[in-house]
Image: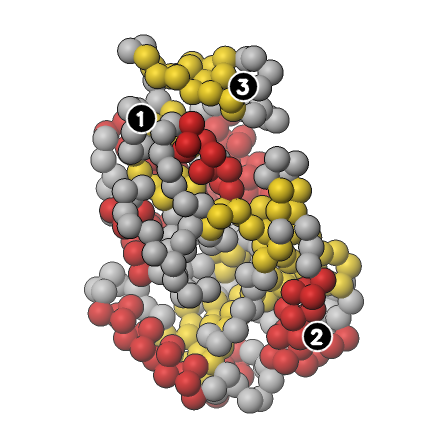
Amino acid sequence: MNAGGVRTLGRHQAELPLSLAAKAMWLEIADLLGDNCGFRAVGGIRIAETESDLQKVRERSGAISALGLGYAERVIDSRELFERLPALARHCVGGLFVHDDGYANPYRTTLAFRRAAERAGAKFEEGTVVESALFKENGWTVTARDGTSYRAQTLLNCAGAWGHRMAAILGDDLPLSPNGSMMIITARMPPMVVPVVGAAGRSLSFKQFPNGTVLLGGGHRAPVDLDTNEAKVDPLALGKAASTVIDLFPFMAEAQAVRFWSGIEGFMPDGIPVIGASLNAPQAYHAFGFSAHGFQLGPAVGQVLADLVTKGTSRIPIEAFSPSRPFFSIAA
């Protein structure tokens, strides 16, 4: 299960049109699916701990405003920061704020989308490993490891951390790196934090739920095995995450971790996903490599794929995600 962040704050600029389209869908998710998916628009804050951090968030805010998307990441001073986060350590000097970011329940969301798809006629085959995919004039034949064959006119590769493997079957060499993203959940604590909180200068993802439990993440990675579908937990990295949280929220020194785990995620060198037509296979499309921030984008990505399949084009700009783009690494 992932952290369930529903955020526009801090995204790569190329993702913002897609993210804003997704935000509009999240704000009406109950109407779309018949389930609100546990979505809460509690706001999102990125903390600036130093004057250097504060300068970075000011520059970020200005760059976002200059895009002309009708979207803002507002700089807040220390007074407003502590009003919104009274439990925050007093060395912090400001931050960025987006009022309608938030989070949802990933498990509940997945089930809600599945039920909606099934109502529309979709069928799900679980535990199915694809061995081959062959295109002929009448469409695709996909063969699973157990010998079962599936036929369709169009193939969508949404295989997550395994996306590069499916891409290779289609003849596309795409540079995904699988990694684990670790998280910690605590026992119930006094209610202290409402917004989703990140930090400008170090890795942090902090959510406190209405029942008092706290979910901690922040991009600390761990080894994974794609063949066994296993992800390991790195205690040293988790300790670093816990130390960051206590530095920023001293009350968390009393927290008791009740569970920690790692999922399996696919990371692209430039930190943004691959979305678009296969380079070498007809009637096939990719959507993977979301690099640990794809949950919020999901509804809009579904709309993009539907448009590509039915109309051959997307109403949302996706050129930046092309499988043919040059891939360059960015700082974590």
> 300 or 57: which is nearer to us?
57
Please give left or right for residue 165 compared with residue 280 in the image. right
Name the residue that disc number 2 marks: 252
Label number found at residue 134: none
Question: Of helix, strand and loop, which one carries label 3?
Answer: strand
SS for callout 2: helix
State which mark lies toward you, 3 or 2: 3
Residue 166 position by quadrant: top left
- Looking at the image, is 252 positioned above or below residue 162? below
Query: Mark 1 highlights which residue?
Result: 281
Q: Whole-Å distance between the Cαs marked 3 and 2?
A: 47 Å
Give the class, few, some or many, for how many residues have Cα within 10 Å of label 2's Cα (few <14, many ≥20): some
Residue 202, horizontal then vertical, whole percent: 52, 73
How many angstroms separate mark 3 from mark 1 (CA)?
19 Å
Asked whether residue 174 appears in the rendered view, the answer is yes
Residue mark closest to the camera, 2 vs 1: 1
> Type of residue at label 1?
Ala
Residue at left 41%, top 33%? 167
Residue lying at 62% horizontally and 47% vertically, measured from the top left:
224
The amino acid beneath tag 3 is Ala
What colouring style does the render use? secondary structure
Q: Earlier in the sequence, mark 3 or mark 1?
A: 3
Given the image, on which type of amino acid does mark 2 rest?
Met
Q: Residue at x 34, y 80 (%)?
A: 58
Q: Which quadrant of the view contains residue 212? A: bottom right
Image check: 7 left or right of 3?
left
Q: How many neighbours does mark 3 have within 10 angstroms: few (below 14), some (14-19), or many (20 or more)?
A: some
